Amino acid sequence: MDELLQELRQLTFETAQQLEVLSAEDLLEFVERREAIIRRIRLIKPYLDNGGEYRQTVEEVLRFDPFIKKKLEEYKTLAGRELQKISAAKQQRNRYEKDSTGYSDGLFIDRKK
């Protein structure tokens, strides 16, 4: 249990220190690694009599959660904006293709002079 908590603590501290330069993929990797560690801790937890001795380490790790969550939200917002741009471009292209493939209401005749 001590090893898992120290691994979680180290992973969290390293991520928090590099938060401003991490890519979305790096944060995704952090979340996946963190979840794997937490799953292993939950497997051990039922066999512990007193979890109070780990409280300080857990609180240290949890202190960084708001900062990490904020960065994840920033990436989520950015991704949402990019999806909106892609959707708007697709709609515009579809409208253009629809207008250019059919006949319009008007008729244009080109006469040579």
Image (cartoon, helix red, strand yellow):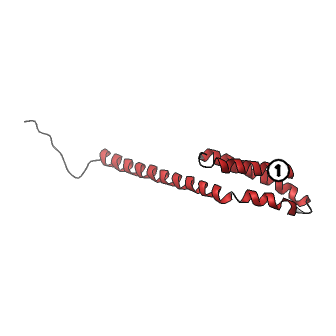
Q: Residue 52: where, in percent of width, then height?
A: 86, 63
The residue lying at 84 percent from left, 59 percent from top is 54
Residue drawn 35% across the image and 46% down it: 97
Q: Viewer-proximal residue, 106 or 37?
A: 37
| Residue 36 in sight | no
Q: Amino acid at mark 1?
A: Leu
Picture residue at 79% right of the left edge, 54% below the top: 39
Location of the C terminus by quadrant is top left
Q: Residue furthest top?
A: 112
On the rendered structure, is 29 left or right of 45? left
Taking depth in this image into account, of 6 and 34 the one nearest to the observer is 6
| Few, some or many residues within 10 Å of mark 1 (<14, 14–19, 20+) | some
Query: How many numbered callouts?
Result: 1
Q: Label 1, on which residue?
A: 4
Quick one: SS at disc 1? helix
Q: Position of residue 87 (x, y in %)?
A: 45, 52
Indicate the position of residue 26 as horizontal and vertical percent values.
64, 45
Q: Residue 74, can we see it?
A: yes
48 vs 53, nearest the viewer: 53
Along the horizontal axis of the image, is 89 left or right of 21?
Answer: left
Residue 83 percent across, percent down from the top left: 49, 51
Residue at 25%, 50% (x, y): give it: 104
